[in-house]
Image: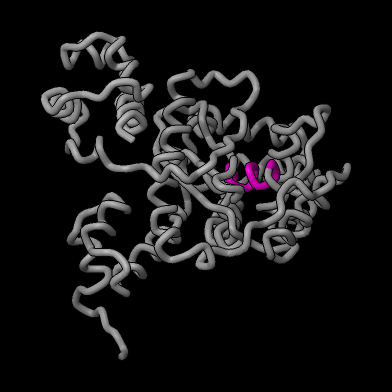
């Protein structure tokens, strides 16, 4: 699996084949052959490649799980995301789930929730009804805040992968690995935007879409209503308000949404007028919120992978070193989590 690892690390470092070839004294054709798997490098070349990437040689030679079948969803139409970034995202997803499924093969698929049926929801004209249906599919109540969306998604049997991608044109994507749905999200966004992106991708996964559906626009509206239901908005904000005010930030924090999302919902539900909404958006633009609104909540982290690895290490199914390699953390971190001070076992 050297070829896949080479391509992953090249894209991760933002290098073209020619740029990498120049750094290690090879031709771009040689790099192309390595990535296609038609040629293998010698030890000296491996050392040079590892040095360029600032990794160990073993990281280039680590086996990939070759039993995985990926189906990646499409990026948004008219995206400005470059081809190399799209390739990096796909390679990052496949590299991560290769490690994830290594531990699943050891512990067994039964340690994951059942694979949920996807693309079964029928869209209605009522966005509020669509959002309620999506909540019920995720085993959530029809109203109220969603304290930890990542946990709810993973408990449904949908895998979550987050990675920092330094490109504002990428927020998220969905797909499947061995028939199990996944959502990949850009960790470079603030926590509120990540939650919105996950809700948006959930709409893509749950509903059945026809070509005439405006998928992105409709999914955005469903995500807004999913995170901030109509009855909640009317109760928390009031039936009529003269504008978007600072007191509403408390509600935004409680529901894990941005003020931009809250303002949009307030306008759609006619809690505020179009003029009041425009005044707020003008002010938000002046403060730079449309690019980088300050976060009011803590990031949500996926815990499933770590839980499975720590379980396997604690039960002696894998070594501490193997666990560290799978999670790409230090030996000390895994050892401390499983056997450090305060750890205990009841025999």
Q: Residue furthest right?
A: 125
Dominant SS type (magenta): helix
Residue at (17% x, 38% y) in the render: 56
Horizontally, residue 195 falls left or right of residue 66, namely: right
Q: Is residue 25 above or below residue 231?
A: above
- Residue span colored magenta: 196-204
Residue at (48% x, 28% y) in the render: 168
Q: Nearer the viewer, residue 179 or 277?
A: 179
- Please provide percent x and percent y for residue 135: 71, 58
- Please provide percent x and percent y for residue 270: 80, 43
Q: Is residue 202 magenta?
A: yes
Horizontally, residue 124 falls left or right of residue 202, namely: right
Q: Quadrant of the C terminus?
A: bottom left
Res. 13 visible in picture: yes
Residue at (20% x, 54% y) in the render: 330
Q: Quadrant of the N terminus?
A: top left
Q: Is residue 216 above or below residue 192?
A: above
Horizontally, residue 100 falls left or right of residue 59, namely: right
- Please provide percent x and percent y for residue 287: 49, 32
Q: Is residue 200 magenta?
A: yes
Res. 12 visible in picture: no
Q: Nearer the viewer, residue 47 or 14?
A: 47
Q: Nearer the viewer, residue 20 or 154?
A: 20
Horizontally, residue 337 falls left or right of residue 128, namely: left
- Please provide percent x and percent y for residue 105: 43, 59
Q: Residue furthest front?
A: 38
């Amino acid at each position: 699996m050297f070829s896949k690892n080479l391509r992953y690390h090249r894209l991760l470092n933002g290098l073209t084949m020619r740029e990498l070839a120049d750094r290690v004294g090879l031709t771009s054709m040689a790099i192309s052959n390595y990535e296609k798997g038609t040629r293998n490098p010698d030890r000296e070349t491996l050392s040079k490649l590892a040095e360029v990437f600032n990794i160990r040689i073993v990281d280039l030679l680590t086996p990939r799980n070759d039993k995985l079948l990926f189906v990646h969803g499409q990026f948004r139409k008219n995206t400005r995301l470059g081809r190399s970034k799209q390739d990096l995202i796909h390679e990052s997803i496949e590299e991560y789930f290769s490690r994830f499924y290594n531990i699943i093969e050891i512990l067994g698929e039964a340690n994951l929730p059942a694979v949920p049926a996807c693309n079964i929801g029928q869209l209605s004209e009522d966005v509020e009804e669509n959002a309620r249906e999506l909540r019920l599919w995720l085993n959530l109540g029809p109203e109220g805040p969603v304290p930890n969306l990542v946990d709810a998604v993973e408990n449904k049997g949908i895998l979550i992968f987050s990675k920092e991608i330094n490109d504002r044109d990428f927020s998220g994507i969905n797909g499947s690995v061995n028939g199990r749905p996944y959502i990949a999200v850009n960790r470079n966004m603030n926590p509120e935007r990540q939650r919105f992106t996950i809700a948006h991708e959930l709409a893509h996964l749950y509903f059945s879409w026809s070509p005439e559906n405006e998928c992105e626009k409709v999914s955005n509206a469903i995500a807004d209503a999913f995170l901030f239901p109509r009855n909640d908005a009317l109760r928390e904000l009031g039936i009529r308000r003269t504008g978007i005010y600072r007191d509403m930030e408390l509600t935004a924090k409680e529901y894990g949404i941005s003020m931009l999302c809250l303002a949009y919902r307030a306008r759609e539900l006619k809690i505020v007028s179009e003029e009041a909404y425009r005044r707020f958006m003008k002010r938000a633009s002046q403060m730079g919120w449309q690019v980088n609104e300050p976060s009011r909540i803590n990031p949500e982290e996926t815990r499933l992978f770590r839980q499975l690895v720590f379980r396997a290490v604690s039960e002696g199914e894998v070594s501490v070193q193997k666990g560290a390699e799978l999670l790409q953390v230090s030996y000390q971190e895994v050892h401390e989590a499983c056997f450090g001070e305060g750890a205990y076992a009841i025999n």
